[in-house]
Image: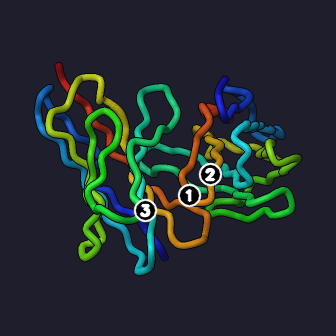
């Protein structure tokens, strides 16, 4: 069965620290990859997405992610986090024409001012 | 106005009661989804619909049913609510390349 694994469940950083959140998936075919963010009390919003082309994709608010096909990974990065980045982050994978997304368990990021 | 709306936003009910959660969208998408979110488990798919006549079970459909009344409306029902259905419920729509757009969520508590 397809699955998505986020390695870090709870991350605590100080402002200006660099961030990398891991995401690995299990599926051998063509995939579409997403990172969503959920700010406290809000709904999920798209941070960035990868469909094809350049494996390094840039999203909103200074986030980027790199698709490494050989490692089945799509890690999220940000060079310098801000207090306002405190949120829960979800990696999601859509495969082929299923029309469904499989979500990881989520990573809670807490940024201390 | 929000593209995906959900009603109610919060609901407290008792075990055994029938509950309906409603979702409407103005994005014109054919595909709609219901998820539940539980701490540490991420989002899990309950039901999804690719058009008005196409309804499919997700990974955790037991205890739930859905109705796709129109392209823009997709309702989730709990026929007889139980406490372990206490969760945050999200409706979503998607375009053909799977980018999903989420509603604000319904926080359901079953006592």
Task: For mark 2, give the secondary structure.
Answer: strand
Q: Nearer the viewer, residue B5 or A4?
A: B5
Looking at the image, which residue sits at the far front? A53
Task: Check whether the beta carbons of the residues at disc 1 and disc 2 lie within 8 A of each other.
Answer: yes
Residue at x 42% of width, y 44% of height: A36
Task: Give the x, y percent position of residue B61.
Answer: 69, 59
- In the rendered image, residues at marks 3 and 2 fall on the same chain: no
Residue position marked by numbered label 1 in the rendering: B98
What residue appears at the point 28 percent right and 36 percent down from the top-left corner? Answer: A109
Which residue is the site of mark 3?
Answer: A51
Q: Is residue B109 at all visible to an observer of this figure?
A: no
Give coordinates of residue B54: x percent, y percent: 81, 64
**Do the CB atoms of the residues marked 1 and 3 lie less than 8 Å apart?**
no
Residue A69 image offset from top left, x and y in percent? 29, 73
What's the residue at 45%, 75% (across, down)? A30
In the image, which disc is placed on residue B94?
A: 2
Chain of the residue under label 1: B
Q: Is residue A28 left or right of residue A17?
A: right
Mark 3 to mark 2 CA distance (whole Å): 15 Å
Percent position (x, y) of residue B44?
55, 54
Disc 1 and disc 2 on one polypeptide chain: yes
Callout 2: residue from which chain? B
Chain to which the residue tagged by mark 3 belongs = A
């Amino acid at each position: 069965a397809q699955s998505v694994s986020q390695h870090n469940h709870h991350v605590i950083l100080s402002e200006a620290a660099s961030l990398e959140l891991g995401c690995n998936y299990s599926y051998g075919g063509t995939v579409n990859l997403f990172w969503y963010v959920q700010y406290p009390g809000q709904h999920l919003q798209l941070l960035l997405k990868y469909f094809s082309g350049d494996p390094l994709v840039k999203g909103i608010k200074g986030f980027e992610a790199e698709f490494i096909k050989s490692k089945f990974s799509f890690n999220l990065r940000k060079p310098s986090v801000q207090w306002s980045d405190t949120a829960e982050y979800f990696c999601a994978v859509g495969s082929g024409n299923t029309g469904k997304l499989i979500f990881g368990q989520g990573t809670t990021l807490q940024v201390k001012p | 106005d929000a593209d995906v709306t959900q009603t109610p936003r919060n609901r407290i009910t008792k075990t055994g009661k029938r509950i309906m959660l409603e979702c409407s969208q103005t994005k014109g998408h054919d595909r709609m989804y219901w998820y539940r979110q539980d701490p540490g488990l991420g989002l899990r798919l309950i039901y999804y619909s690719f058009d008005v006549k196409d309804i499919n079970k997700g990974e955790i459909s037991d205890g739930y049913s859905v109705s796709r009344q129109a392209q823009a409306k997709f309702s989730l029902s709990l026929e007889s609510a139980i406490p372990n259905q206490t969760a945050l419920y999200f409706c979503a729509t998607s375009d053909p390349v799977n980018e999903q757009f989420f509603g604000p969520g319904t926080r359901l508590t079953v006592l």
